[in-house]
Image (cartoon, helix red, strand yellow):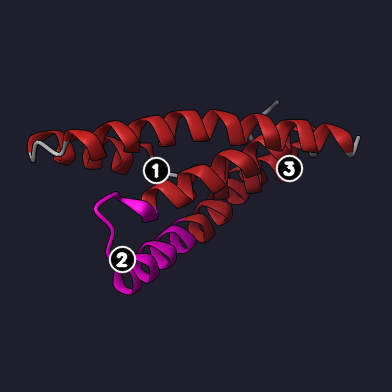
Amino acid sequence: MKLTLFHILLVGCGGFLGAIGRFAISQYVNKKYSFKLPVATLIVNIVGSFMLGMMVGVEVAESIYLWLGVGLMGSFTTFSTFKLEGIQLHVDNKWNIFIIYNVVSYGGGLLLAYMGFALGRLYI
């Protein structure tokens, strides 16, 4: 693939929308609910894993993948926030929550990415 200005714009537009979506979900969840577990980050990462798996399973066109997969899902999901929240749980000695958060995030992310991929393959 030759990188063009159009590709950059697709990723940038998707990234803009994904970041806003993540921010809006985080604000809503954190204001409306109080959990010991960082649920907002968990939700966006799990949903993003499923959606990205589905896009790969369906084999979307390159331009759609750049816009939705790389741009939107790339900025919607957040590995850095996930890691920071894990470190905060560790530092605060919240071991049970730390373990649950990591198991659900990694295991759930992999499971839902696979489920999205498998579901996407059904539509090919």
| Vertical placement of residue 114 versus 81, above or below | above
Q: Which residue is mark 1?
A: 78
Inspect the image, locate mark 3, and give the three-letter code of the amino acid beneath it. Answer: Ser
Q: How many marks?
A: 3
Spatial CA span between label 2 and label 3: 34 Å
Point 69% across, 40% down: residue? 65
Q: Which residue is mark 3?
A: 63
Spatial CA span between label 3 and label 1: 22 Å
Q: Could you tell me residue 88's position as x and y percent? A: 15, 41
Q: Could you tell me residue 44's position as x and y percent? A: 47, 50
Label 3 Cα neighbours within 10 Å, binned few <14 / some 14-19 / many ≥20 = some
Spatial CA span between label 1 and label 2: 16 Å
Label 2 Cα neighbours within 10 Å, binned few <14 / some 14-19 / many ≥20 = some
**Residue 33: within the magenta?**
yes
Span shown in magenta: 19-40
Q: Residue furthest bottom?
A: 32
Q: Mark 1 or mark 3, which is nearer the start of the sequence?
A: 3
Q: Which element carries disc 1, helix, strand or loop?
A: loop
Point 49% across, 58% down: residue? 16
Inspect the image, locate mark 1, and give the three-letter code of the amino acid beneath it. Answer: Thr
Q: Could you tell me residue 95's position as x and y percent? A: 18, 33
Please state, as top left, top right, bottom left or bottom right, where the C terminus lies in the image: top right
Label 1 Cα neighbours within 10 Å, binned few <14 / some 14-19 / many ≥20 = some
Inspect the image, locate mark 2, and give the three-letter code of the amino acid beneath it. Answer: Asn
Q: Could you tell me residue 32's position as x and y percent? A: 34, 74
